[in-house]
Amino acid sequence: MVAILRYFTYNRGKHRREEDMTIDFYAVLGMAEQRKRELRIDQSEHAVEAMRDKGAGRLDSKRAHLSAIDERAASASKTSQRSYY
């Protein structure tokens, strides 16, 4: 997947030039995976679960939203991503 982003560059703050920048999603993903290996980040299920945001400071509106997602998934006989309310 490739994304084309439009961005602006400025020449001494006076002239604005519009350019396109192409980003290859899979190349960025590969670089991120390589960086994880270099940093020796543990990607086991237990380690990932320990790093997951447990939602201690989550707003009630966000908790209600996550609950609605779980209910909708259950009604469609699907499994949603684990959420902490």
Image: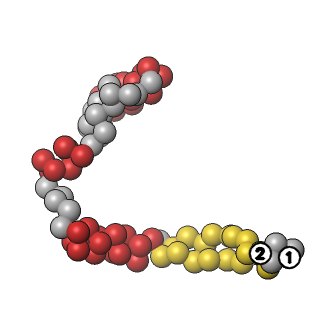
Residue 71 picture quarter: top left
Residue at 61 percent of width and 72 percent of height: 4
The answer to the question of whether label 1 and label 2 lie on touching residues, with beta carbons closer than 8 A, is: yes
Residue at 24 percent of width and 46 percent of height: 51
Mark 1 falls on what kind of element? strand
Q: Is residue 83 left or right of residue 62?
A: left
The residue sitting at the right extreme is 14
Name the residue that disc number 2 marks: 10
Give percent across and percent down for residue 54.
28, 34
Residue at 87 percent of width and 74 percent of height: 14
Mark 1 vs mark 2, CA separation in Å: 6 Å
**Which of the two residues, 80 or 48, is positioned nearer the viewer here?**
48
Residue 53, label in figure: none
**Label 2: few (<14), some (14–19) or many (≥20) C-alpha neighbours in 10 Å:** few
> Which color scheme is applied?
secondary structure
**Label 1: few (<14), some (14–19) or many (≥20) C-alpha neighbours in 10 Å:** few
Name the residue that disc number 1 marks: 15
Give percent across and percent down for residue 72.
38, 28
Please determine whether, in this image, residue 30 is positioned above or below residue 47.
below
Mark 2 falls on what kind of element? strand
Give percent across and percent down for residue 20.
67, 77
Give the mark nearest the N terminus, 1 or 2.
2
Quadrant of image for the C terminus: top left
Q: Inspect the image, locate mark 2, and give the three-letter code of the amino acid beneath it.
A: Tyr
Q: Is residue 76 left or right of residue 13?
A: left
The residue sitting at the front extreme is 12
Q: Inspect the image, locate mark 1, and give the three-letter code of the amino acid beneath it.
A: His
Residue 7 picture quarter: bottom right
